[in-house]
Image (cartoon, rainbow, N blue to C red):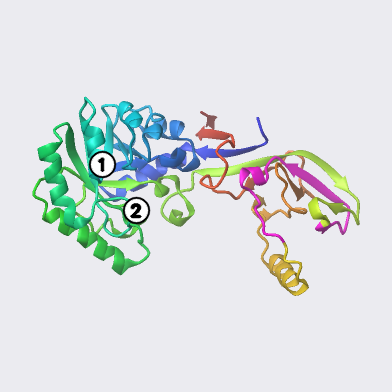
Amino acid sequence: MRNFWCEVDLDKLEYNINKIREKTDKKLMAVVKANAYGLGIETISEFLDDKVDYFAVSTIDEALLVKSEKDILILTPVYTEEDIALVKDNYILTVDNVETLNILSSAEKDFRVHIYVDTGMNRFGIKPNKVNDFISDIKSLYKNIKIEGIYTHLHNTANTKYTINQINLFKNILDNLEEHINEIHLLNSNGFIKYNDSVDFDTTVRLGNIIYGYDSHKHFCKKIYQYKAKAIKTYYVDKGEFIGYGNYFKTKNTTKVGILDCGLIDKFGFTKDLKRNIFYDAAKAVYHHLKYNSGIIYNGRQLRILGRPNMNFTLVNMDGIEDDAIFNIDMSPIAGDSSIPKKYRKGDVNV
């Protein structure tokens, strides 16, 4: 086991779910796409199974990793015949085009679907003026496809005026539907924070970031993850010696050095090369001296990285710090390499 890992606090995950439940009576769809935002789709979905109403993933391959009998919405409306053969009874497919409908109709099985409406993002989705015809065609021409839901995506929630117009556009689409559809969802994490109280026509909230307590939602929920590291070796370097690649760091005193088991391969410590311009480099050095952020924290203070991060290791100043100290590493699971070990905790127990 490496001396570098991501600790995931399941108590905080449960706290976040309960906090969300306090704010709404709507159904809760937990988005566990992208390996549960880097936190481990299998363990996270298993823990959430009795706490949410259903799940959302990006692809059918991801759905296969969710060992739940609850409904699982596949968000990406692009499928191959091989994908379709893997669809289980609790999978709900997103549809937004005739080509997908034709692939589904060629299979000898029934499919449950949600229709994705493009209200401005221009990525996936059926255009608003084509929704009724699309639904009518499904009803009349594709007998093995059952429409169970309809949704859109709020992609610019920081712009209140734009988002309110987007919400109103989607509501207008719903008001003019010729067919009743049971499940309606549009609020993602940012949308839930800002607009849940004013949106009363949806049945479900579709949440990812907020469940895991990512930074943009730390005022509402708790961050459930923390990268940690221990030194795999400590030693002393004499005054006046260089440390690390490029000789960028020279000791001013005898220095205790710790080697941490994390580096560029883990997506930690990416830095831009110096410009070899004396004025630029001097200004940059002053800035970093005044506001230093190494991303390695011990007892509330930033540790100094000695030289540049290596491919597999990072060298830090451990003056006055015990050899077996555990450091917090400031990284996001979304950016961090998926091979970094994860330790899940519930109370004081590793699970």
x then y, percent, for residue 246: 81, 55
Circle 1: element type: helix
Q: Amino acid at mark 2?
A: Arg
Q: Which mark is residue 123?
A: 2
**For discs 1 and 2, the disc positioned in front in the rendered view:** 1
x then y, percent, for residue 101: 22, 38
* Residue at horizontal 23 percent and vertical 57 percent from the top: 199
* Residue at horizontal 80 percent and vertical 50 percent from the top: 244
* Residue at horizontal 24 percent and vertical 28 percent from the top: 107
Q: Amino acid at mark 1?
A: Glu
> Camera-side residue: 132 or 245?
132
Which segment did they paint magenta? Answer: 248-273
Circle 2: element type: loop
Against 73, residue 168 (above or below) is: below
x then y, percent, for residue 140: 10, 39
Where on the picture, by quarter, is residue 118? bottom left
Q: Is residue 12 magenta?
A: no
Q: Which residue is mark 1?
A: 99
x then y, percent, for residue 62: 40, 34
Quadrant into which the N terminus falls: top right
Where on the picture, by quarter, is residue 232? top right
Q: Are marks 1 and 2 in contact (CB under 8 Å)?
A: no
Against 174, residue 67 (above or below) is: above
Sequence-first disc among 1 and 2? 1
User: 10 Å neighbourhood of mark 2: few (<14), some, or many (≥20)?
Assistant: few
Q: Which mark is residue 138?
A: none
